[in-house]
Structure formats: C-alpha cells, structure tokens
Image (cartoon, rainbow, N blue to C red):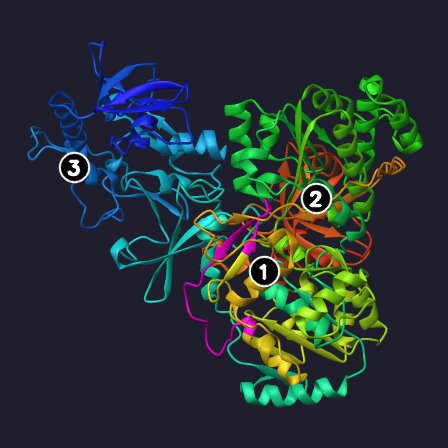
C-alpha cells in the first residue's frame, strides 16, 4: 500500500493506483472526458490535470500513478483557469444547439461548462463545420460530427471492448473527425455502445431520436431478457410507452456495455402480435372469449381428460417465481412430473446434474475468467453471449488470460485466443478425450498410481494416435496454467452426442483437479433464465434445487410444505412428452411462453404431436405458431409487465422489474396459474411474487438466506451446495467417421436470439436477411458466390435464403440461424439427428423471386 494526500485528505491505496482513482475514493471530483474506467488511460482531454508537489507542470490524474507520500492539489486557481480554458477551446467549435440535441439534459459537456467553464468565450471566429446535416451511419446510429469533442471514447470502445473496429478517426488536430469506413458502419455490431459512452450528442440512437427528454422519462432498472449473461438495463418509458434502453457502469456484470439485442431489441414488448383476449377453438378456428367463458370451457375440458396423462412445457425466459409456481402447479394440481424447460433438445440431466453439482461455480464471471486459462467448449460466444465476449476479450488483453477455443463454429474471439481447435459438430467429446490423454501422458508421473489404475481404459488416446489435430496444443496450455476455467456452451446440447461430451468435460475437470489446478466451470446459456429454470425444478427428474424426484425424503418434505402430494415417478422430458402425444396417451398438455412447433428439431413430428393431444393449453403473450394449434389460449403478461427474478449464468439472482402494464386483457402468469389451479379445485399457496421468492429462499438450498431486500443493484449470488464429485471416469467415445456430405448446423445469430427478438421492429431493421453461411472452399466447389439465393435441401424439406461466404468457416458445414420463423428451419431436421445432411444448390433465376416471396409469407 502507498499513501497519498489530496487536498489535505490522506488515503492508503494499492500500488499502481492512479491519482484519479484515489481522488474518487475520497469523494473529490476531478472532471474527465476521455477517461473510461474499463480502458487504459488516454490522457488526451487534459481536463483532469492536478498539481503534484515537486513537479513543475500540471499532471493528468488519470495517467499518473500514486507514489508513497505524494501530495496532490486538485482545486487551485491555476487548475481552475486551465479547466476553463480547455472548455473554452471545446466550445469554440461546438454548435450551441442544446435545445434540439438529444443529449440535452444529460450532456457531460453541459455539466462541465456549468461547473468549470468560462462565463464568456474569448473566441469570435466562425465555428468549424464538417457537415451541414447529420450522417445516418446505420439504421440505429446517427452522427453529428460537428458536436464531437474528440475524446476517442467511441473509437476505443468499439475496438478494444467490442472488437468490431467499425469506427476510426481521420485528419488531425482541430480537424480530427470520427467516422465509419467510407461514412458507413458496415462492420458494426450495431450495439450502440459508442452512443452510450459519447459524452455529447455526436453519436445518437436513431430509434430514440426526438422522442423524449431525459426529464420526461420514468426509468426502471431491470435485467435483459435475451441471453443468460444477465446484463443490467435501465429502461426509459414515457406515460407507459417504451422509449429507450441504457445501462450503468457501476451496476451489473456488463459494466455499461450492451449488445444490439439488449440496447435496441426491447421494443418487442409493444409487438403487434400480442394476444388480446382469451381464445377457444370453435369449428377449427380460435375465437376470442371472456375470461369467465374460457374458465367455464376449460373446467369442462379438464374434467373430460381427468385420469389421463398430463405434461407441461415452460420457457427458460420466465422469471424464477413463475417457473417455480409452474412446476408446483403441474406436480400438485395435474399430478405429473412430466415437465420440461427446453423446446429445442432433450437435456441429459442424469449427466448434467452431477457435473453441475460437482464443478459449477456460482461466482462473478469477471472473477472466474481471470484464471490463467479459460477453455471455451462449443458454440459461438460472439453471437450467443456478446457481452460475455467483451469481458473475455478484456481479460485476455488486460490480464493476459490464456484463451483456448474448442468449437465447430468460428467466432470473433478466435483472434484473441492462444489456441483454436475446430472440431466437427458432435466431435467435441473425442477431442476432449484426446486432451485428457495428453494431460495424463504429460504429467502422469504426478498422479498417484492408484488414480492412474482407476482411470484404466477410460482415458482416451493422445491426439497424435487418433489423427485429431489440435488437442495436444490445448493439453499443453492447460498443463502450464495454475488455474483453469471451463466455459461450456449450451449449444452442445443440440447434438445426440451431448451426453458423451458432458461426460468428457467431467473427465477433464477431474484430471485437472487431480493435477492440483484451481478450477471453475460455468455454462454459457443463451436464454435469460436457463439456470433459474433448472434451479426451480422445471425438469422431469429433478425437484427444485436440482434434487432427484426419486428422493423420498426430499419429496416428502416439499409435499409437506406445499400441502399436496408429489408423484414419485420421474416424468417424461420433451422428447417423451411428444411421443406420448403422438401415441394418443396425452390428456392435457400445458405450454407456457414457449413455441416447440418452431424450435423443436422436427416440425412435422411436433405438429402431429400437438394435434394429437386431447387438450392443448397455451399461455403466452404472443400468438406463436404453437398457440395457433391450441384448443385454449390464455393471454399472459410479457417481459416488463410483471416483477420477478432471473438467475444468470454466474448464478447471480437479479430483479426483473415491471415498467409497463399488461397489454389488452392479459393477466400475470401467476394469476393465470391460480385461475387454472382453481379449475382443478386446488389452491397454490403462496401466490404472490414476493411470498414465492421467500419460499424459494427457504426450500431451495442454493437460494437459502436470500431476500428480496437483499437483492441490491448487483443482485446476489446463489451458493454452490457442496457435493463430492463422483470418482468415476467415463470411457472415451469412438472417433466419429468423417462426413462425406455437407452438414447443416444451427444456432443464434448476432441480431436475434430465439424468436422473441424477431418481434422487435428495430432489430429487424439491422438484422441480416435470412442467410446460409458456408466456407469459401465449399462454395467455390459448388460454383456459388456470396449473395446468391440458394436452396438448402434435406431428406425432410428445404428452405431458400441468401448465401453468405465466410472465409473462417470450416469446410463441410452449412450454418443457418435458427432465429427466422419464416424459414421454418426445423422442418429440415429430424429428431435425434444433428448435424443434418443437406445439399445446397443455387436457385434458378426464374424461380428466385417467387420462392423468396413464398418463404417470407410462410407458405
């Protein structure tokens, strides 16, 4: 520690701290423009100059390290005069258009001038003008170059944090101007982080432009609904109407940054696709009715299917309290454990549960990615969890973390990685087995003999003996690190090999543990509350707290608290639920806020299954494809229309707050559960959000001790429940045969996440049209060019979209984002088969227009 005195106040700070950081800890205000907390100091704006005893000139406090015994003065006549002069120079060319500038009322330059600026300017020359009109850089970003004060925040944010490098500067001195390449932002993520950090009105949000003033807005702090990173949002509304989103530096995991979905994708709450009233099917069509009418009808229909099997599906985007109450409703009122929170794959929870219990770290992401090595397995972080990508890049560049990538799809993080290994989809397990073998071969002498004997034939062969390229480099990097974090993409669960992959991740973590490495593991979920959905027990084999349904003691204790019996037999997952429907063995299927008809990888099978259920109830905010097949449709509140909590990928519980009233005749999800339970002559107690959270905190071990009041601005962490890892090593899978055909994979794209975001008008203006990504090698062999309209055909069906040639894409793979409903991508796939063999051909010129039109109309 070193001691510093600023304006008579003395403080001990860590060595390497800057004068500015010390001053802020003392509550001494030193103004800045170019300074950003998450980036190295630039010291270009000169607003933070201070006097330091023993130095002849003023020094920039943001870039001056504290030395022991340093004495600093932050407010002297010389400093005041310097600040005033700097502001006068900025105002010399700054347009005085505050009354029409979107930044008016929250402009840092305005605030600085009021606090430190001159009362009268010394400059009388004409102001410099770059452009007479604002420049529309993209559908969501507009620029007034004349207002720019050249602080470089936007350029540095874009390059050093986001990694997009879409902004830069031209010219020099007073003629410096920030711009996109050739006046556009072609390489931009459209995340708007440049707008967030701009201290003036140079960069503005086009969707928010001229809509409101900051003093007109009611602002609500909440959590992003799009992915599991769990970013903090501040939603601005005016008279209940959604206006904009911003974020805060000092709250949440995201530290002010957001991705395009979080910043510009919340207008889906006002989608025209909302369900307005309850509906029942009459003569083959859904007919709007009153809540009383739907209650009478549903009571009769539930009585008619009494005694038959029941099942429920719920979305992992719903808050914890709703998910907890849903599984309680199904287990008590419907007498079934057949519930699931996935509509895209069947989760192998027999393997996943023990892996999470033994190794999952419920800790800040910033902490776990600070380990010596971070291994990312599967998926594409750039497009699935963009803000997590920002944090990983920051850790690599600032803390020298060794980033290791093992995946089928390339991502922008590859450029920052120490080792990148491309594997075929489903081949992750084999590669991980080779990594384990490489570690054991390299340091086997460090392992006890009985441990090596216990491994036996369960550890695979080294990479050199299997012909697999790359795992030996991963093993070498992992061997060198003292601490290792493994980040597991939930995208791995798409594959039929998911269980084998999870088993090999388990093996790898065991080996690293035996080698004395510090360990952390977290999942990269692409749904906002997937962790919470599992914790709440929306699973066929697990009760709340990830405890087995078959555990008689736990089940009896829960039943006693709930005042109702819980079935003892494990339930069916989504695969088995749909099978029972097709077999005519399903009485009531209750689906809440999820759309298996568009998400499950076999559209025809799902359509047959949903049509075969005796009673299909859909509770949703939007008229989804699945709702279109329902017998009863119940309009529910959507995101932002009810309170609750999300549990993000870190295990952090955060408040989801209400910022608008439910639309039309929609009711809250909890109120609808009470309504349905009453029709079954049951009462769900407790039934309010706060009381349900208290029950969760009492009955779910990881949440014990939490309280609503204790969930501050940063939320609160659930705790890992200590579980001894099973001392079992799983046998390595066989090396998969090389595919001799093009193989189709899917996943999220940058601008959309599932089908919720596709209801955002703003995102639809920036998102790419539906596309097919392929490697340059494959497209050259097929005689295809970037931008061609192509047909992707499988044994199940076909779709048409625009070709996007990706030079980084591996040979043999075809990628189509799953996020476009009109493509009906799942119609090409067959359950249990992933990736899907396809052929790709160019659309004949005479068919191109007609086919594209038909696709977009959903024909």
Inspect this view and state whether residue 101 appears. Answer: yes
Q: Position of residue 271 (x, y in %)?
A: 48, 66
Considering only order in the chain, which callout, 3 or 2, is on the residue closer to the N terminus? 3
Please say if 418 is above or below 838: above
Q: Report which residue position mark 3 lands on.
A: 115
Which quadrant of the figure contains the N terminus?
top left
Q: Is residue 482 left or right of residue 23?
A: right
Which quadrant of the figure contains the C terminus?
bottom right
Tell me the mark number nearer the camera, choosing from 1 and 2: 2
Please say if 278 is above or below 344: below
Give the distance between the C-alpha atoms of the residues marked 2 and 3, in whole angstroms: 54 Å
Q: Position of residue 692 (x, y in %)?
A: 56, 66
Residue at 63% from the left image edge and 48% from the top image edge: 525
Inspect this view and state whether residue 282 appears. Answer: no
Decide whether residue 659 is among the magenta residues: yes
Tell me the mark number nearer the camera, choosing from 2 and 3: 2
Decide whether residue 577 is among the magenta residues: no
Secondary structure predominantly adopted by residues drawn in magenta: loop
Tell me the mark number nearer the camera, choosing from 1 and 3: 1
Mark 3 Cα within 10 Å, few/some/many (few <14, many 20+)?
few
Mark 2 Cα within 10 Å, few/some/many (few <14, many 20+)?
few
Q: Position of residue 517 (x, y in %)?
A: 70, 26
Q: Is residue 768 left or right of residue 567?
A: left
Specify the label residue 320 is tagged with.
1
Q: In which image quadrant can residue 30 be found?
A: top left
The kind of secondary structure element at disc 2 is loop
Specify the label residue 1 is tagged with.
none
Give the distance between the C-alpha atoms of the residues marked 1 and 3, in whole angstroms: 45 Å
Considering only order in the chain, which callout, 2 or 1, is on the residue closer to the N terminus? 1
Q: Report which residue position mark 2 lands on.
A: 722
Magenta-drawn segment: 646-670
The kind of secondary structure element at disc 1 is helix
């Amino acid at each position: 520690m070193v001691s510093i005195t600023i304006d008579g106040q003395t403080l001990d700070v860590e060595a390497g701290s800057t004068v500015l950081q010390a001053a802020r800890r003392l509550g001494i205000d030193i103004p800045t423009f170019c300074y950003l907390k998450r980036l190295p100091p630039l010291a270009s704006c000169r607003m933070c100059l201070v006097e330091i005893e023993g130095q002849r000139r003023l020094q920039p406090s943001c870039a001056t390290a504290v030395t022991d015994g340093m004495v600093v003065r932050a407010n002297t006549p010389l400093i005041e005069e310097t600040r005033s002069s700097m502001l006068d120079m900025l105002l010399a060319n700054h347009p005085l258009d505050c009354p029409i500038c979107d930044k008016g009322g929250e402009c840092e330059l305005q605030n600085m001038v009021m606090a430190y600026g001159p009362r009268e300017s010394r400059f009388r020359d004409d102001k410099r003008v770059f452009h007479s009109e604002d420049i529309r850089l993209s559908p969501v970003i507009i620029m007034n170059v004349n207002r720019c004060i050249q602080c470089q925040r936007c350029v540095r944010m874009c390059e050093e944090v986001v990694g997009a490098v879409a902004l830069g500067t031209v010219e020099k001195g007073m003629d410096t101007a920030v711009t996109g390449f050739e006046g556009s932002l072609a390489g931009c993520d459209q995340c708007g982080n440049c707008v967030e950090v701009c201290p003036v009105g140079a960069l503005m949000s086009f969707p928010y432009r001229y809509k409101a003033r900051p003093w007109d807005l009611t602002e609500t702090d909440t959590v992003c609904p799009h992915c599991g990173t769990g970013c903090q949002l501040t939603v601005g509304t005016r008279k209940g109407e959604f206006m904009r989103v911003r974020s805060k530096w000092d709250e949440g995991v995201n530290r002010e940054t957001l991705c395009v979905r979080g910043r510009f994708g919340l207008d889906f709450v006002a989608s025209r696709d909302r369900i307005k009233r309850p509906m029942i099917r009459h003569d083959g069509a859904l007919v709007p009715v009153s809540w009383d009418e739907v209650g009478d009808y549903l009571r009769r229909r539930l009585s008619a299917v009494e005694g038959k099997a029941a099942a429920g599906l719920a979305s992992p985007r719903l808050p914890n309290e709703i998910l907890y109450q849903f599984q309680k409703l199904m287990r008590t009122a419907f007498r079934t454990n057949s519930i699931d929170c996935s509509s895209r794959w069947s989760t192998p929870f027999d393997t996943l549960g023990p892996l999470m219990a033994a190794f999952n770290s419920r800790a800040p992401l910033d902490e776990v990615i600070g380990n010596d090595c971070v291994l990312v397995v599967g998926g594409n972080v750039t497009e699935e969890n963009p803000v997590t990508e920002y944090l990983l890049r920051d850790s690599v560049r600032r803390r020298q973390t060794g980033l290791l990538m093992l995946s089928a799809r390339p991502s922008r993080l590859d450029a920052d990685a120490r080792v990148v290994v491309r594997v075929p989809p489903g081949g992750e397990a084999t590669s991980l087995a080779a990594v384990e073998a490489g570690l054991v071969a390299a340091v086997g002498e460090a392992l006890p003999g009985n441990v090596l004997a216990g491994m036996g034939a369960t550890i695979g062969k080294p990479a050199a003996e299997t012909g697999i390229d790359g795992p030996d480099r991963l093993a070498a990097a992992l061997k060198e690190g003292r601490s290792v974090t493994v980040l597991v993409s939930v995208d791995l669960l798409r594959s039929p090999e998911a269980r084998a992959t999870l088993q090999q991740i388990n093996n790898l973590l065991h080996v690293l543990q035996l080698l004395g490495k510090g360990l952390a593991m977290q999942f990269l979920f692409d749904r906002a509350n997937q962790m919470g959905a599992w914790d709440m027990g929306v699973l066929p084999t697990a009760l709340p707290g990830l405890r087995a349904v078959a555990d008689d003691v736990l089940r009896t204790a829960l039943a006693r608290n709930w005042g109702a019996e819980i079935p003892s037999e494990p339930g069916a997952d989504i695969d088995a639920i749909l099978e029972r429907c097709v077999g005519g063995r399903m009485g009531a299927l209750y689906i809440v806020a999820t759309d298996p008809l568009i998400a499950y990888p076999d559209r025809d099978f799902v359509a047959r299954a949903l049509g075969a259920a005796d009673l299909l109830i859909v509770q949703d905010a939007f008229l989804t494809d699945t709702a279109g097949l329902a017998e009863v449709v119940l309009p529910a509140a959507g995101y932002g229309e009810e309170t609750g909590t999300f549990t993000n990928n870190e295990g952090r519980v955060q408040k989801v707050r209400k910022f608008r009233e439910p639309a039309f005749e929609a009711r809250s999800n909890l109120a609808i559960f009470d309504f349905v339970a009453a029709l079954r002559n049951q009462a769900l107690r407790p039934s309010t959000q706060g009381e349900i959270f208290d029950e969760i905190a009492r009955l779910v071990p990881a949440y014990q001790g939490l309280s609503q009041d204790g969930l501050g601005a940063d939320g609160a962490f659930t705790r890992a429940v200590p579980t001894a890892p099973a001392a079992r090593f799983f046998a390595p899978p066989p090396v998969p045969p090389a595919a001799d055909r093009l193989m189709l994979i899917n996943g999220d794209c940058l601008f959309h996440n599932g089908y919720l975001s596709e209801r955002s008008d703003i995102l639809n203006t920036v998102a790419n049209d539906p596309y097919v990504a392929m490697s340059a090698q494959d497209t050259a062999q097929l005689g295809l060019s970037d931008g061609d309209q192509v047909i992707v055909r499988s044994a199940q069906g076909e779709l048409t979209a625009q070709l996007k040639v990706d030079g980084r894409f591996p040979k043999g793979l075809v990628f189509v984002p799953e996020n476009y409903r009109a493509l009906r991508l799942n119609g090409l796939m067959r359950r249990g088969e992933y990736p899907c063999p396809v052929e790709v051909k160019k659309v004949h010129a005479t068919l191109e227009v007609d086919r594209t039109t038909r696709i977009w109309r959903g024909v």
